[in-house]
Amino acid sequence: MLLSKLFIPITKDLPAEAKIKSHQLMLRTGMIRQSSAGIYSWLPLGFKVMKKIEKIVREEQNNIGAQEMLMPTIQPADIWKESGRYDDYGEEMLRISDRQKREMLYGPTNEEQITEIFRSSVKSYKLLPQIFYHIQWKFRDELRPRFGVMRCREFYMKDAYSFDLTENEAVHSYNKMFYAYLKTFQRLGLKSIPMKAETGPIGGDLSHEFIILADTGESKIFADKKIFDIKVEEFKNNESSLKKMRENFSKYYAVTDDKFKKDEFDKNVKKSDQLQTKGIEVGHIFYFGDKYSKPMNCSVDNKDGKKTFVKMGSYGIGVSRLVAAIIEAKYNNEKMKWPISVSPFDVVIIPSINKNDNSNLKKATKLYLELKKNNIDVLLDDIDENLANKFKKHDLLGIPFQIIIGSKSQDDEFEFKEIDGKSKMLNSNNITKELKKYFV
Ligand code: ATP
Ligand code: MG
């Protein structure tokens, strides 16, 4: 892609409500545009990042055997009346009616919808366990939408639902999802902490929030630093290993401020291991047994032919929130840096362009075509502007690798650098090889 052709409508005056870095940067780099309060359009650059995040989320769901499907955004009110949540959900739910005056709503979550699908088609324990997921827009009429896509009204979420016969099996499904979440956030270049959480309006017995560290997060967190020594690679996707993984995590103190007690913290965690910081919730998982299956009469026959309400769990990841959360976690010294796995481009070529001499641009174009041929997603900064300004712009865009073509570049030798690392001189062949290590 040529930078001169890329649609990056930069917002000149940042709106006053853009208080946190990610919101400001997403507006300044034209990733999103507000449509109305808490509702955004995703412009090409932002959309590209979100789709990359979505792909990783999807792959890790598939890896634990979850099956992808797609449920609608608009749901009938009836199923929510059955579960008893139609009134409980309150004003966060956007209620609408169609031309026949049927009550509908824009889904804030999908427990009722999936339970309805399951109960009408599964009658025997033999089809269990099952995990389904979809990645779909949600609407919650938040009282105070803020921080851009971090807390908005319309947002993109991966939500999964598990169905099991027994509580033990259901906890195994929960553990699998726990594992998939750790792997997902790791691939997104994030340090995540699973924290025991309240179950809130979703309800239930067991719940964890996955929080990533960022100074601007809404949640205050108190944790034992040693929790970061647990490596997800040490565990396998089988029942005993995943049980061990959960036990390991539960050994370490990690809570948000609503559960924090100073004396407990001091008693359980050595001073030098005490971590007090802020974080952003990027995922939340719940086990809630028959909370929905019972009122909605969702049952299967067990081995002895006895009717049994299925045990369910639900599991959310804020895919659109993650775009902002990654920016918050990675922004440093006035520079953005996308993790390699979700960067909008793999590499940017920055030639120094001089009106009277187009040799650098020529070299840059040749390298650009070469990289494209090798399936590297490359951006060429072909704009006639001084290098200092170009660097400022690329510090904002945060593409992880840069190739600079200026006075130092010989015929086939270019300055290659990681955005905040050292540079080295490489020829085009070696640049291709180096980039292929990461991207192809
Ligand atoms: P929060 O505690 O942040 O209000 P929640 O507990 O209501 O979120 P869940 O129902 O657990 O959210 O939803 C799963 C995920 O969806 C959350 O972990 C978060 O990443 C994302 N999410 C929830 N609400 C919003 C929102 N208003 N804007 C953007 N993402 C959201
Ligand atoms: Mg939550």
Image (spheres, rainbow, N blue to C red):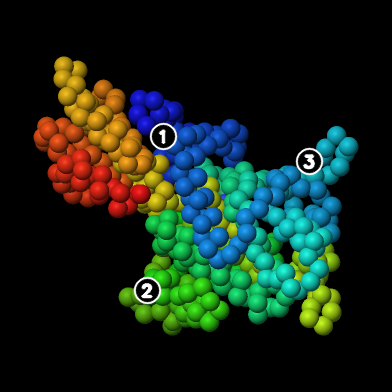
Write down the quadrant of residue 67 in the picture. Answer: bottom right
Number of residues whose C-alpha sits closer than 10 Å to that of mark 2, classed few (under 14), some (14–19) or many (20 or more): few
- Which quadrant contains ligand 1? bottom right
* Residue at 54 percent of width and 68 percent of height: 178
Residue behind label 3 places its C-beta within 8 angstroms of ligand 1? no
107 sits to left or right of 363: right
Q: Name the amino acid, label 1.
A: Arg
Q: Name the amino acid, label 3.
A: Ile
Q: Is residue 260 above or below residue 214?
A: below
Q: Is residue 300 above or below residue 95?
A: below
Marks 3 and 2, how far apart at CA? 49 Å
Say how many tags the image has: 3
Say which residue label 1 marks. Answer: 28
Write down the quadrant of residue 8 in the picture. Answer: top left
Say which residue label 2 marks. Answer: 229
User: Residue 84 in the image: x percent, y percent?
Assistant: 81, 60
Label 1 vs 2, first from the N-terminus: 1
